[in-house]
Amino acid sequence: MKKAELKQYKERLLAMRTRLRGAVNHLADSALNKNRRDGGDLSTMPIHMADLGSDNFEQEFTLSLMETEEDTLNAIEKALERIEEGTYGICEECEVKIPKARLNALPYSTLCVKCATKIEQRR
Ligand SMILES: [Zn+2]
């Protein structure tokens, strides 16, 4: 891959990382605030069971969203490392070149579509 192209992907990855970090922090904050509110604050009214249920659901949803974002962040870190190593754009598994269309859609992908599908099925 040409240096100029690599630089473009690197810039996109860095921008994505900044954005995601902000999003994760924001989600973590709101999840924590919920915890605090549901916790031992004696001045609040007794919590209705139904409300508690939906709050927990919402919190779990937020936490699972955070996990996905963290996974993406990890993938971005890995892709950035691969840019430094000079292996960016090459599939980690089978070492074929990852098509540009895929990199443009998912700049942090370190696997070709075939291997990504295979790993997905292994889970
Ligand atoms: Zn592959």
Image (cartoon, rainbow, N blue to C red):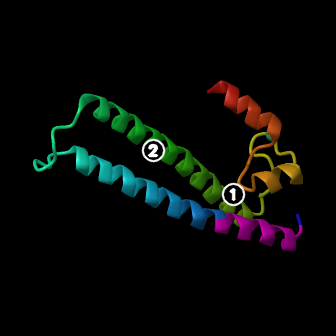
The amino acid beneath tag 1 is Ala
Horizontal side, residue 67 vs residue 78: left or right: left
Mark number for residue 62? 2
The magenta span reads 2-15
Task: Check the image and report above or below for 121 versus 104.
Answer: above
The residue mark sitting in front, 1 or 2, is 2
For image coordinates 89% across by 69% down, the residue present is 2
Work out whether mark 1 precedes mark 2 in sequence or the reverse, and give the earlier one.
2
Crowd class of label 2 (few under 14; some 14 to 19; many from 20; radius 10 Å): some
Give the quarter the ligand 1 occupies: top right
Taking depth in this image into account, of 102 and 48 the one nearest to the observer is 48
For image coordinates 75% across by 52% down, the residue present is 106
Q: In x, y percent, where is residue 36? A: 24, 51
Q: Quadrant of the N terminus?
A: bottom right
Task: Check the image and report above or below for 15 versus 87.
Answer: below
Q: Secondary structure at mark 2?
A: helix
Magenta segment includes 94:
no
Does mark 2 have its CB less than 8 Å from ligand 1?
no
Q: Which residue is mark 1?
A: 79
- Distance, label 1 to label 2, CA atoms, is 26 Å
For image coordinates 65% across by 63% down, the residue present is 16
- Main secondary structure type of the part rendered in magenta: helix
Taking depth in this image into account, of 6 and 52 the one nearest to the observer is 52
Horizontal side, residue 123 vs residue 50: left or right: right
